[in-house]
Amino acid sequence: MTFSLALSEEQIAAQKWAHDFAEKEIRPVAAQYDETEEFPWPLVKKAYEIGLYGFDYYTMSGQDSTGLTANLVVEETFWGCAGIGLAIFGSGLCLAGLASTGTPEQLGQWAPRIFGTPEDPKVGAYAVSEAGAGSDVRSLRTRAKKVDGGWVLNGQKSWITNGGIADVHVVVATIDPELGHRGQASFIVTRDMDGFTQAKKERKLGIRASHTAEIAFNDVFVPDEHLLGGQDKLDAKIAKAKDGSGEKTKSGALSTFEATRPIVGIQAVGIARAAFEFAAKYASERQTFGVPIIKHQAIAFKLADMATEIDAARLLCWRGLWMGINRVPFRYGEGSMAKLKAGRVAVWSTDEAIQILGGYGYVKDFPVEKWHRDSKIYEIFEGTKEIQQLVISRHIEREVSGSSDV
């Protein structure tokens, strides 16, 4: 069997395509959007016009069985700016939630609407987290009650990427709280539904070009056809949960996060690489004691460690996405490994970059302080670093004990 990490001509072209967009379109305005915290609609529109945004992009990247095309494109985009990158790729989580729980007919109906058109781009949102239920998805309090012709939703979601500005929201709600995640279902909620509102828009430490908000549901009526997976599938799931035969089923939300963690990890790699490259260039130009500071081992060894750790994180992300696309089971939580490592490396590398620049690293005249602020979220969202450790350790326990539980 042949093993190779060599990129194909098509993958190299995709990498350059994304890098050029990041360098020419994203980087020149990154500081502006970080300062104003406005959503970068003009950048989303430009990304759509060149094929970097939209349902067709995900169809194209999904056809690469190696998973590397998506990794390469996302890393380059987030090298440009993590906040703008999330504005462009944040809708992918909504699409993943739709694809993991919806029927083929629902996917065909709603996936294009998530993105709109190049002339009138839209975004999507995946709404799971709540003020009292972030990592613990079993404790969601947003309720869905069955009524004639549909469902009525009540509750509130917190820290939702694109929340309130999205045309399509995939919302995870509880039907039977006694069943934990087995008593939950996902629904399509559109922005124009009565009783659906955006509450507070969050002001954040980093990724400030990305829109994050609380959203509220006050007697929001959702038609039957907006129940993802359909009523028959939900009834079967609830019945299995009640008689005990469904105890080992996974949460739909957790399954979505498992699939997206490697691509979230590669976002962090893009930030780390940006900081490394800037720090290396600075170190080659800044002089002390008559020589560039890169000649001093104290600086040179920092850069050596940064390069090594970034490569290690990147390879974990490549493996994780390859496994996901090819449906290779995560034996040790490899998706979580990718995000855990990449998040740690991004925070550490950006901190080291600040240290290399010294006082210049601490001021807004240089971008490394922004990259440091952007990096921290990668140890928090889509599962904190502690949750990743928990997932990995449970996989290890399962392998050692021979149990089928995770």
Image (cartoon, helix red, strand yellow):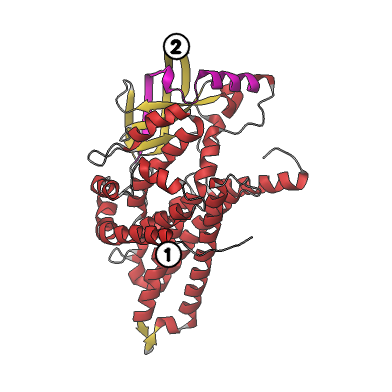
At label 2, which amino acid type do we have? Val
Compare residues 70 and 23 and report the one nearer the observer.
70
Name the residue at 25% across, 57% down: 29
Compare residues 103 and 131 and report the one nearer the observer.
103
Q: Is the residue under label 2 in contact with that under label 1 (CB below 8 Å)?
A: no
**Whether residue 319 can be seen here:** yes
Relative side of 155 to 323, left or right:
left
Q: Is residue 160 above or below residue 85?
A: above
Q: Point out the tag, 1 or 2, that comes first from the N-terminus.
A: 2
Kind of element beneath mark 2? strand
The residue beneath circle 1 is 273
Q: Label 2 neighbourhood size at 10 Å, few (<14), some (14-19), many (20+)?
A: few
Kind of element beneath mark 1? helix
Name the residue at 59% across, 23% down: 237
Q: Is residue 217 magenta?
A: yes
The residue beneath circle 2 is 147
**Magenta stretch bounds:** 212-241
